[in-house]
Amino acid sequence: MAQVEIIPFLLTILLHSLNPATAVSATATTGQDQFVFSGFAGANLTLDGTATVTADGLLELTNGTVQLTGHAFHRAPVSFRTSPGGAVRSFSASFAFAILTTYPGLSCHGIAFAVAPSTDFSSALAAQYMGLANIDDNGNATNRFFAAEIDTMENVEFQDINNNHVGVDINGLRSVEAHTAGYYDDTNGSFHGMNLISGEVMQAWVDYDGEAARINVTIAPIAVTKPVRPLVSARYNLSNVLREPSYIGFSSATGPINSHHYILGWSFAMDGFAPAIDIAKLPKLPRLGPKPRSKVLEILVPIATAAFIVTLGTLVVVVVRRRMRYAELREDWEVDFGPHRFSYKDLFHATDGFEDKHLLGKGGFGRVYRGLLPKSKVEVAVKRVSHESRQGMKEFVAEVASIGRIRHRNLVQLLGYCRRKGELLLVYDYMSNGSLDKYLHYEVERPTLDWAQRFQIIKGVASGLLYLHEKWDKVVVHRDIKASNVLLDKEMNGRLGDFGLARLYDHGTDPQTTHMVGTMGYLAPELLRTGKASPLTDVFAFGTFLLEVTCGQRPIKEDAQGDQLLLVDWVLDHWHNGTLLETVDTRLQGNYNTDEAYLVLKLGLLCSHPSASSRPNMQNVLDYLDGHAPVPELASTQLSFNILALLQNKGLDPYIVSCPPSSMMSFGTISDLSGGR
Ligand SMILES: Nc1ncnc2c1ncn2[C@@H]1O[C@H](COP(=O)(O)OP(=O)(O)OP(=O)(O)O)[C@@H](O)[C@H]1O
Ligand SMILES: *[C@@H]1O[C@H](CO)[C@@H](O)[C@H](O)[C@H]1NC(C)=O
Ligand SMILES: *[C@@H]1O[C@H](CO)[C@@H](O)[C@H](O)[C@H]1NC(C)=O
Ligand SMILES: *[C@@H]1O[C@H](CO)[C@@H](O)[C@H](O)[C@H]1NC(C)=O
Ligand SMILES: *[C@@H]1O[C@H](CO)[C@@H](O)[C@H](O)[C@H]1NC(C)=O
Ligand SMILES: *[C@@H]1O[C@H](CO)[C@@H](O)[C@H](O)[C@H]1NC(C)=O
Ligand SMILES: *[C@@H]1O[C@H](CO)[C@@H](O)[C@H](O)[C@H]1NC(C)=O
Ligand SMILES: [Mg+2]
């Protein structure tokens, strides 16, 4: 405890030695007859109640707590008479004060400079009694005090003139003389009102003329020198009031409203005017409530606030838009497929926001974009498949994940997927040489492939399809074999793509096929009849593909009359006529291996046999292509099969059927073939 108290004490001493500003200059002319406190640090005062001297040397009479009193009196009493029983001598006091309020315009009760017989105010009341008297002794001549009140409340019982006045009180709070706070201008005598609770520092002078028995009280703003004309001047012979000796000091009280009453400096003198208080050395007032804002801040703060709000708003919009832009669908069951999951953000950035210049092509399921994955720098093809229903999604994603494990040099690797609302994104290895159909049917864009390349591609696709059908742990039916789904890698190897969109079924289980996927001209007759895809329907499509590559013609071509004709039927006619090699692509200009071309054409016809049981499986196909086994002779009874007529019989949209063969006739799913329209 001792240490705790010693520290501020030492601090005070240190402050004093360093800063003479707060030093007390109690220069005694005759004993303690005269002093000046420009700040109260080290002043010898008797304090009670809420009165304290702050570390800054500010005398705080009330601290903001309601209904309390505070007194600060000069510890040494003052002799007002030269001889016992004599008249009270002239004296003069001045003090700097300030009243700070918590509520603007409301304060109570005020400060009084008092000359009193003792420093015991224990019977005095707070509020309107200002810590000087109580309800019983107010005004009683036995009180023997004189006070100059700075009153901020109007109390009718004391006949106060208003709530902002200065008065001379003798023995009680009913003023002998009072005046509204203010001062008279020295130059022209005009009155300047002052607001006692403005929070400004003000100065007061209390002068008693012993000879004339006159009390003058004057107040003025701290910057104004003492006005010549006093605010209140009362004739009152204090010889009949004051005891010998008496104490001088301040009394203050709060009422129901908390207020802070401060004395910043004080000077006193007997028989003359109080010495001037050094205003420059007065302690600083504390700041109550919010800091008064500077003009600059008053302008800057709203601007800064507005800017902040706008920035925040923009940020929120940006974040929300970002979230919307990159929003994905993720469900619990997908956790297992985590490694195959791509973030939409990555795919978005990989394709520069799916910009048109990255568009590789458009198919039956959606658009395909070329992209560069931001982290791994892997080139990918991103296929956006619009997908409305959640149904079947789980199965599909499971398939994607399982298909993602399929790796074969003649298959386009499926790297993973991403789901968004109404959309599925599939990420594939990028095939730099594009799809085969571009070389076969858009010769303007690409150089024609020579026979060796074509044969190489055919063999590649065959081995890729064999892998799907037989070499992998599940039977994967591709369902959409065609030239545009054969992609060419850097070495011009044919790779089968888009098997990700086909359905899978396990070995041995009967496929429950309810949807049909495929492209006109590649569809096996039994697929159109039953809607059931199988490895043999793939073989049929592969047969058509063989003819397409060899003949350089679309699966549905036009004959000389402009009628639509299946390529298979056209080649079959030539076979019947013994002119099979006439069907070989004329762009090859005869530069091809006739044995190989003959083999491929025959194999194409065999694979496209209308009867599924007559078609070879993919292992056979590969054996024939590799020359390990001869291609069986086609039965001369093989019938031309008018698939177009079948389609019309099945009630399919004639538009699809009559669609010119040059246009992509890929269609998504036909749920019920027999239903018709
Ligand atoms: N992995 C890939 N690498 C390079 N290009 C690709 C890749 N995948 C697709 N493409 C290009 O995008 C085009 C469109 O492909 P998409 O699979 O959507 O349509 P399609 O093959 O014509 O028809 P389908 O919808 O029946 O598959 C292809 O023709 C091809 O040029
Ligand atoms: C004010 O002073 C009184 C008496 O010393 C004390 O009880 C009260 O807590 C003080 N209030 C504040 C706000 O310091
Ligand atoms: C304060 O004044 C009292 C009474 O005059 C005196 O006894 C005491 O020594 C003084 N204290 C200081 C620190 O001046
Ligand atoms: C004044 O106070 C004295 C003693 O305190 C008491 O005897 C006297 O009656 C009081 N006078 C009035 C007018 O109340
Ligand atoms: C007196 O002088 C003050 C400035 O010192 C001026 O504001 C005021 O108007 C004057 N009053 C009269 C009555 O001239
Ligand atoms: C008090 O004021 C009057 C003018 O109202 C003045 O004549 C007198 O000298 C003043 N007395 C003192 C002590 O200042
Ligand atoms: C004041 O009262 C005292 C004592 O009663 C007296 O001696 C003195 O003359 C009076 N002074 C005036 C100016 O009336
Ligand atoms: Mg495709």
Image: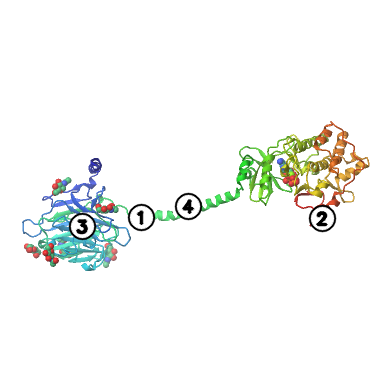
Q: Give the residue number, with chain letter if any, for mark 1.
A: 292
**In what element is the residue under mark 2?**
loop
Question: Looking at this view, is 646 or 206 the one in front?
Answer: 646
Which label's residue is closer to the chain start, 1 or 4? Answer: 1
Which label's residue is closer to the chain start, 3 or 2? Answer: 3
Residue 540 horizontal side relative to residue 474, left or right: right
Which label's residue is closer to the chain start, 2 or 1? Answer: 1
Mark 4 and mark 2 in contact? Answer it, CB < 8 Å. no
The tally of labels here is: 4
Where residue 96 appears, as percent x and y from the top left, is 23, 55
Question: Looking at this view, is 527 or 421 the one in front?
Answer: 527
Q: Give the residue number, with chain letter if any, for mark 3.
A: 251
Which numbered dot is residue 651?
Answer: 2
Residue 353 horizontal side relative to residue 154, left or right: right
Q: Give the residue number, with chain letter if any, for mark 4.
A: 308
Question: Looking at this view, is 576 or 469 the one in front?
Answer: 469
Q: Amino acid at mark 1?
A: Pro
Picture quarter with ligand 1:
top right
Mark 4–mark 3 distance (CA, rounded to whole Å): 50 Å
Mark 1–mark 4 distance (CA, rounded to whole Å): 22 Å
Question: Looking at this view, is 66 or 150 the one in front?
Answer: 66
Which label's residue is closer to the chain start, 1 or 3? Answer: 3
Mark 1–mark 3 distance (CA, rounded to whole Å): 29 Å
Which label's residue is closer to the chain start, 4 or 3? Answer: 3
Residue 27 horizontal side relative to residue 82, left or right: right
